[in-house]
Image (spheres, helix red, strand yellow):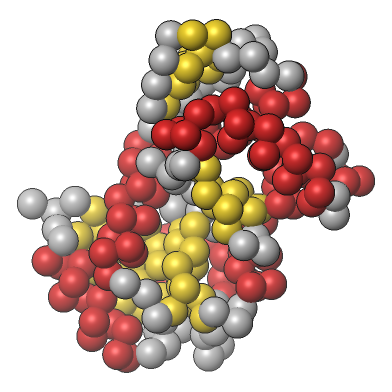
Amino acid sequence: MISGRILVVDDEPQIHRFLGPALSAAGYEPLRAERGDDALRQAASAAPDLVLLDLGLPDIEGQEVLRRLRAFSEVPVIILSARDQEAQKITALDSGADDYVEKPFALGELLARIRTALRRKGQTQPATQQLDFNGLRINATAAKAELNGAPLALTKREHALLLLLVRNHGRVLTHRQLLTALWGPAHTEDVAYLRVYIGQLRKKLGDTLSAKLKTEPGVGYRLEE
């Protein structure tokens, strides 16, 4: 049974030789593109369920492929990036990518990230919905939350930060995305503010849940599944 179509966009033949059989074995139908223009055509015509996008393509820069893709599709995008591309990773995440995996990557980690992104794609969360996550229950419209049935004392800013993380669980949220949402565009460089609030949240969430709030060094934060 096919679990979904995965479009792999990379100009390295060895990546396709490795990922094609691995994705098939995991129950996905792999689609292959080695150029940005072909990737955009397939994204429009084949309607993949997820895109694995390398940033270094021979014809169109990966960032531009992402920008054009987001003009017509909300398909989940996971960036495949080299370790020395931190600035590009951040730009891609800010531009609408859902996640990134560094090259060389472990297949198990990549498949886990794919499953998470596909689960998030299938979820709908209206603005008024009450969200449940690992013993945490948070009201999206009122600054109220419970942890394992007990009231959780949060400030309005802490509630807003936690709500963002829960709504996007499994996804990397960059410093810029979080700071813009919480303090506005004038504070996109005030990472120290964010560190303070993340630290306060970790203290209030307890050991089990705070362990799921992961720091992505130099990039942002992720609330793990």
Q: Is residue 215 left or right of residue 10?
A: right
Residue 186 lies, in percent from the top left, at 91, 46
Could you tell me residue 142's position as x and y percent? Answer: 65, 10
Judge whether 74 appears above or below 41 on screen: above
Q: Is residue 30 left or right of residue 38?
A: left
Kindly give the residue lying farthest to the left in the view shown: 1
Q: Given the current orientation, which residue lies at the most extreme right position?
A: 186
Vertical relation: 65 (above or below) 154: below
Image location (x, y in percent) of residue 67: 62, 63
Q: Quadrant of residue 201?
A: top right
Question: Measuring 55% from the left and 8% from the top, which residue is drawn there?
Answer: 151
Above or below 174: residue 193: above
Q: Can residue 91 be seen in the rendering of this structure?
A: yes
Q: Residue at x 35, y 37 (%)?
A: 122
- The residue lying at 33 percent from left, 63 percent from top is 109
Q: Is residue 98 left or right of residue 157?
A: left
Query: Looking at the image, how many numbered discs can be counted on the residues?
Result: 0
Is 78 located above or below residue 143 in the figure?
Answer: below
Residue drawn at x 39%, y 49% as measured from the top left: 117
Picture quadrant of residue 219: bottom right
Which quarter shows the C terminus? top left
